[in-house]
Amino acid sequence: MSANEEMLELLETVAARLGVKVSYEAMQAGSSGGLCRVKGEYRLIVDKKAPLSERVATMAHSLAPLDWAGLDLPPRVQARLRQVPMRPVRTVSA
């Protein structure tokens, strides 16, 4: 198993522990997926046709802003999540 394959599996575990449902779907060109909320629950959609490194990046960028600090994670996973530049969370009001 490659390092990227292992990291993807570890990030999938992080998502599950945070209650985030992960699905792999074919995306249109120019989109790699991301995190969204559907009926009050987080869902992470990842482009199943994207290169492995891009799938890892999508997972890390989507999970990094969530509250994972209380989870007992391997140091390499913590380091990967900390590498993500933090952006302000966008909110949409009706």
Image (cartoon, rainbow, N blue to C red):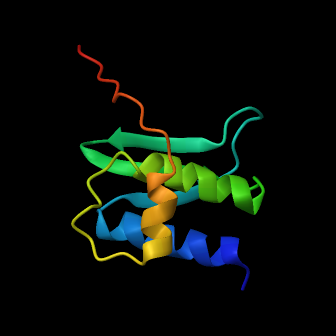
Give the image location of residue 74, x and y in percent. 42, 78
Q: Residue at x 44, y 44 (%)?
A: 35
Quarter of the rendering containing residue 65: top left
Q: Residue furthest top?
A: 94
x, y percent for residue 39: 27, 42
Vertical relation: 86 (above or below) 23 = above
Residue found 50% across the figure and 72% down from its top: 76
Q: Nearer the viewer, residue 59 or 48?
A: 59
The answer to whether 29 is drawn above or below residue 43 in the figure is: above
Which residue is at a point 26% across and 71% down the rendered structure image?
71
Q: Residue 41 appears at what percent x and percent y?
A: 28, 49
Can you say whether 22 is above or below 32 in the image? below
Give the residue displayed 46% in from the left and 57% down from the top. 81
Horizontal side of 40 relative to 33 (left or right) equals left
The image quarter containing residue 21 is bottom left
Q: Quadrant of the C terminus?
A: top left
Image quarter of the N terminus: bottom right
Residue 16: image x %, image y %?
Answer: 36, 69
Question: Looking at the image, which residue sits at the far bottom?
Answer: 1
